[in-house]
Image (tube, rainbow, N blue to C red):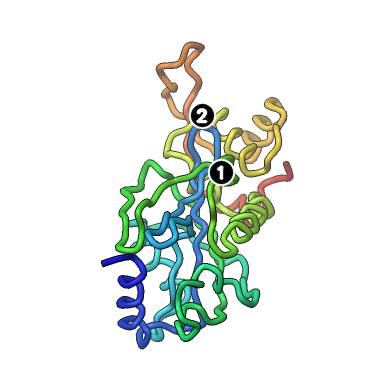
Amino acid sequence: MNPQKQFLKKSEEAKDLFIPHLSTDPVVFGFDQSELKVLLLQMTYRKQWLLPGGYVKKDEDLDAAAERVLRERAGISDVYLEEFAVFGKKNRSEFYFEDFDDSLWHKQRFISIGYYALYNPDNANLIIDEFSEKCEWIYLSQLSEIELAMDHREIIEKALLTLREKISHKPIGYNLLPEKFTLSELQKLYEAILGKELNRGNFYRKIKNLGILKKLDEQRRGGAHKSPDLYTFDEENYAKALENGLTSW
């Protein structure tokens, strides 16, 4: 069955299950090789890239819908999710569905609830759903090279700005780094989110003064230089520090 006919068949089946004018679009950020990544799907229809979003069931809470959509469309669960914005420009989906008749319910105006999500890519066993050809982590630096559908580029940009604003009040490092990490890796994460370089000495001093780290009796092995010390987050102190805001960067 060609992608268009497959979509029409599934659309008719889903029409009575979902709220036709409401969707959720999670922006899932990961961190790897000192860069931020975002999770995207390449659709079979039109070959464009989309966020792993979907519609909200009539008997479903919004947060539960975002969790379900990520699980069904990408195979991700137990993810940190937070609502950050609403997107509702008129005609935001018309071009994507231009090959379909105007009566298609997906083609009508709908509101999307944006969530930003934080996930360590090392923990993910990604799946490909029936409407997608690919489900991949894409570096933010590569987004200009791919075609994003609808207003999903705008949603990603807004999510990144939100992440920057909340970096001192949300457990961002805790959700994006592995359990054990070096101070250099933590600094690179903050630099990737903020989009700027930070002074190494000042960063290390601020972080250590916060008391949110536990130094381990282990080092990162395998590098050409001196093996750096490994740290982990002190969960109790981290939670307390977040209540007051960590620090300004």
Nearest to the eye among marks 2 and 1: give it. Answer: 1
Q: Nearer the viewer, residue 51 or 119?
A: 51
* Residue 39 coordinates in the image, percent (x, y): 46, 51
The residue that label 1 is drawn on is 145
* Residue 212 coordinates in the image, percent (x, y): 56, 41
The residue that label 2 is drawn on is 182
> Does the residue at mark 2 contact the one at mark 1 (Cβ under 8 Å)?
no
Q: Earlier in the sequence, mark 2 or mark 1?
A: 1
Question: In the current view of this chain or complex, which residue is farthest to the left?
Answer: 1
Q: Under tag 2, what secondary structure? A: loop
Work out whether residue 69 can be spotted: yes
* Residue 184 coordinates in the image, percent (x, y): 57, 28
Residue visible at 31% across and 60% down in the picture: 129
Q: Quadrant of residue 243?
A: bottom right
Identify the mark at residue 127; answer none if there is no mark: none
| Three-letter code for the amino acid on which mark 2 is drawn | Thr
Residue visible at 33% across and 83% down in the picture: 12
* Residue 140 coordinates in the image, percent (x, y): 57, 44
